[in-house]
Image (cartoon, grey):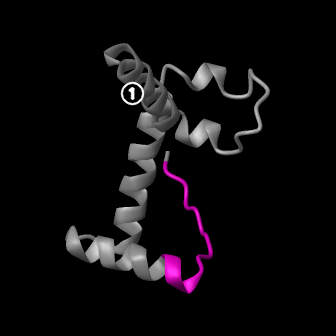
């Protein structure tokens, strides 16, 4: 079953969406639907999702940026081992 979702976007967000859609040969609506599907697949396949909200932290964007933070931490650890 399909559902219709109506959202209001700021003009600057819509302009970016429209430009990206045009580059991919899609309508803004098609592009947004594909993007949402992709984001949902990535989120549901993320093994760290189960830990979101499980720890107290002052890092506000941890849930969205955890891959970047983990990568940075691993890189720092590897650099320390080389020294």
Q: Is residue 22 left or right of residue 49?
A: left
Q: Nearer the viewer, residue 42 or 74?
A: 74
- State the extent of the magenta-drawn residues as a range: 2-13
Q: Residue 61: x and y, percent?
A: 64, 44
81 on left or right of 70: left
| Secondary structure at numbered mark 1 | helix
The picture quadrant where one finds residue 74 is: top left
Q: Is residue 65 above or below residue 70?
A: below
- Residue 16 pos. (x, y %): 41, 76
11 in the magenta segment: yes
Q: Residue at x 74, y 28 (%)?
A: 53
Q: Is residue 82 magenta?
A: no
Q: Which residue is at a point 55% across and 54% down the rendered structure image?
A: 3
Q: Is residue 73 above or below residue 36?
A: above
Q: Main secondary structure of the magenta part?
A: loop
In the image, farthest residue toward the top? 81
Front residue of 3 and 38 = 38
Q: Nearer the viewer, residue 25 or 66?
A: 66
Could you tell me residue 72's position as x and y percent? 45, 33
Q: Which residue: 43% across, 82% down? A: 15
Q: Which residue is mark 1?
A: 75
Determine crowd level at label 1: few under 14, some 14-19, many 20+ residues with C-alpha closer than 10 A. Answer: few
Residue at point 35%, 64% (across, down): 31
Residue 48 lies, in percent from the top left, at 54, 22
Indicate whether 81 appears above or below 26.
above
């Amino acid at each position: 079953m399909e559902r219709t979702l109506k959202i209001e976007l700021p003009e600057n967000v819509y302009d970016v969406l429209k430009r990206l859609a045009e580059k991919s040969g899609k309508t803004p609506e098609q592009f947004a639907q594909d993007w949402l599907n992709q984001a949902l697949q990535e989120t549901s396949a993320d093994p760290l999702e189960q830990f979101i909200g499980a720890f107290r932290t002052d890092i506000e964007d941890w849930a969205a940026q955890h891959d970047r933070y983990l990568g940075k931490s691993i890189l720092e650890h590897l650099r320390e081992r080389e020294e």
